[in-house]
C-alpha cells in the first residue's frame, strides 16, 4: 500500500482500539471514519489482494454474512464486519483490524452497495431481498432496485448470487451476466405486486411468479430450500442443522452455501461450520435470568417482524419499540405489520414508542400489558421462556440491560 494508506491503517486500528478500551463502543465505525479522513481511498487499498464477497439486502444481511464467513473459513482466514457496521467506515475498520487475509465477507447497507462495489471490486455479490425500510429517509424499493441494477451493469465481471423469489431482486440482478439463483422463499409480498420493468401487475401461484405485461418471471433456482435442507445445483440434497431458529435462516444458510461455492467450497465442507453459529451480534442469543430463559430477536421493518413471529415460540412475548435515529423516526410502518399471530400468547410492550405500539395492537385486537422496563417484564411473566422482539435501539438497550446483570 502507499505510505499514506499505511499511516491511515495504523491510525484506524489505534482509534478503534482506544474506543473499545474507553468503553465508547466496539470501534467498528470510528476507526474507519478516521482512516478515510486521512486517505479517502483507504477502503480500496485495504480490499486489494483479497477475494471479497458482499452481502446486501433489506433483511438477513448480518446473519447471512456470519454464515457465509463461517463457510468460507474452510479456505482460510476471513475478514468480516461482524458487528454489523455495514457502511464504508465499518468496512474500512474491519479490513484494517483483520490485517492481511486472503478473503473477506462484508455486510453492505443496500444504499451503499454501488459505492462499495466500486471500492472493493468483489468476486461475488449476494442480493437477498428488497422491501420497505425507514421510509422517513430511505429510498423507495423500486428506486433501490434500479440503483442495484445500474451498479451491476457497470461491473460485468462480478458474479451475483440472487434471490429468485423476489421480483425486485430478479430485475436488479439482470444487470449482471453472471447470476446464480437461490430460492429462500418470500413471505413478504407487499413491495412487489407491481413489475419494476413494465409497471404491470405481478401474479403468484404455487411458489412461482410472473409479470402479466412483460417477460419478467421467476428464474429456475440452482440452490433451493427443501424440507429441512438445501438442494445444490447438482440436485444433491443436504441436511442443514442450525442453532438459529426459523425457516428464514434455512434460506440464509442456502444463500451462504451458494456464496461459498463461488469460492470453491463444497456444501459437505461448509455445513459443519454453519452448525457452529449460535447467535449473530446478539440476535437469537438466549440468556437465563431469574428463572426465565430470555431469547432476543431483532425486527426492524414489516418484513422482518413477520419472520420474527415465525421464529418465536408460543410463549410470553415482550415487544419493544423505539424511534431514535438508527431506527427511523417514523413509526407508521407498524400498520404494515399484522400482529394477529400474537393473539395466542401473553404480550407485553415497552420502549420509547410503546404507546404507538399499543394503539396498533388495539386495532389488531391483540391483548397486551404495558411495562415500563425490561426488569418489570421479567417479573411479569412466569418462569420459562420469554421471547423478546425489538427494533434496533430497543434491542441494544435490552442487550445492555442483560449485560449489566450477568
Image: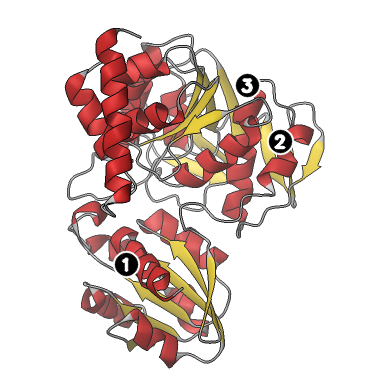
Residue 148 is situated, as x and y percent measured from the top left of the image, at 36, 25
**How dense is the environment of label 3, judged by Cα within 10 Å: few (below 14), some, or many (20 and up)?**
some
Residue 4 makes an appearance in the image = yes
Residue at 27% in and 60% down? 333
Label located before the other in sequence (2 or 1)? 2
Query: Counting other residues with Cα less than 10 Å from the Cα at mark 1, is it few (<14), some (14-19), or many (20 or more)?
Result: some
- Crowding at label 2, few (<14), some or many (≥20) Cα neighbours within 10 Å? many
Display colour scheme: secondary structure
Write down the quadrant of residue 395 in the picture.
bottom left
Report how many numbered discs are placed on residues in the image.
Answer: 3
- x and y percent of residue 332 in the render? 22, 62
Q: Which label is found at residue 397? A: 1
* Residue in front for this viewpoint, 62 or 2: 2
Horizontal side of residue 173 vs 258, given as left or right: left
Residue 70 circle label: none
**Residue to which mark 3 is pinned:** 262
Q: Nearer the viewer, mark 1 or mark 3?
A: 1
Which element type, helix, strand or loop, lies under badge 3?
A: loop
Name the side, left or right, on which 278 lies relative to 200. right
Q: Quadrant of residue 247?
A: bottom right
Q: Are marks 2 and 1 in contact (CB under 8 Å)?
A: no
Is there CB contact under 8 Å for labels 1 and 3?
no
- Nearer mark to the viewer, of 2 and 3: 2
CA separation in Å, label 1 and label 3: 38 Å
Q: Looking at the rendering, in which quadrant would you find the N terminus?
A: top left
Residue placed under numbered mark 2 in the picture: 270
Q: Nearer the viewer, residue 106 or 196?
A: 106
Amino acid at each position: 500500500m502507499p505510505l499514506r494508506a499505511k499511516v491511515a491503517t495504523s491510525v484506524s486500528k489505534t482509534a478503534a482500539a482506544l474506543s473499545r478500551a474507553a468503553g465508547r463502543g466496539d470501534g467498528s465505525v470510528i476507526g474507519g471514519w478516521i482512516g478515510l479522513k486521512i486517505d479517502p481511498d483507504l477502503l480500496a487499498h485495504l480490499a486489494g489482494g483479497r477475494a471479497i464477497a458482499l452481502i446486501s439486502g433489506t433483511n438477513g444481511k448480518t446473519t447471512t454474512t456470519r454464515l457465509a464467513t463461517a463457510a468460507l473459513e474452510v479456505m482460510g482466514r476471513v475478514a468480516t464486519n461482524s458487528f454489523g457496521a455495514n457502511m464504508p467506515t465499518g468496512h474500512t475498520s474491519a479490513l484494517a483490524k483483520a490485517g492481511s487475509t486472503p478473503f473477506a465477507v462484508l455486510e453492505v447497507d443496500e444504499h451503499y452497495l454501488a459505492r462499495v462495489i466500486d471500492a472493493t471490486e468483489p468476486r461475488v455479490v449476494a442480493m437477498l431481498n428488497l422491501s420497505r425500510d425507514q421510509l422517513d429517509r430511505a429510498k423507495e424499493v423500486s428506486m433501490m432496485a434500479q440503483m442495484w441494477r445500474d451498479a451491476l451493469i457497470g461491473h460485468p465481471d462480478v458474479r451475483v448470487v440472487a434471490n429468485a423469489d423476489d421480483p425486485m431482486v430478479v430485475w436488479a440482478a439482470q444487470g449482471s451476466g453472471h447470476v446464480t439463483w437461490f430460492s429462500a422463499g418470500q413471505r413478504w409480498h407487499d413491495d412487489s405486486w407491481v413489475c419494476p420493468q413494465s409497471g404491470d401487475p405481478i401474479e403468484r401461484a404455487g411458489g412461482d411468479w410472473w409479470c402479466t405485461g412483460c417477460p419478467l418471471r421467476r428464474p429456475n433456482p440452482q440452490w433451493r430450500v427443501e424440507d429441512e435442507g438445501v438442494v445444490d445445483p447438482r440436485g444433491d440434497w443436504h441436511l442443514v442443522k442450525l442453532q438459529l431458529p426459523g425457516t428464514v435462516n434455512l434460506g440464509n444458510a442456502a444463500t451462504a452455501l451458494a456464496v461459498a461455492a463461488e469460492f470453491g467450497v463444497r456444501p459437505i465442507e461448509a455445513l459443519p461450520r454453519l452448525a457452529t453459529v449460535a447467535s449473530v451480534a446478539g440476535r437469537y442469543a438466549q440468556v437465563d435470568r431469574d428463572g426465565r430463559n430470555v431469547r432476543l430477536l431483532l425486527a426492524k421493518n414489516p418484513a422482518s417482524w413477520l419472520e420474527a413471529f415465525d421464529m418465536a415460540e408460543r410463549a410470553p412475548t415482550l415487544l419493544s419499540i423505539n424511534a431514535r435515529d438508527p431506527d427511523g423516526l417514523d413509526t407508521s410502518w407498524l400498520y404494515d405489520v399484522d400482529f394477529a399471530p400474537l393473539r395466542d400468547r401473553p404480550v407485553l410492550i415497552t420502549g420509547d414508542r410503546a404507546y404507538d405500539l399499543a394503539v396498533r395492537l388495539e386495532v389488531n385486537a391483540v391483548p397486551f400489558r404495558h411495562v415500563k422496563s425490561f426488569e418489570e417484564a421479567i417479573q411479569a411473566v412466569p418462569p420459562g421462556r420469554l421471547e423478546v422482539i425489538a427494533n434496533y435501539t430497543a434491542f441494544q438497550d435490552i442487550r445492555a440491560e442483560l449485560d449489566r446483570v450477568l
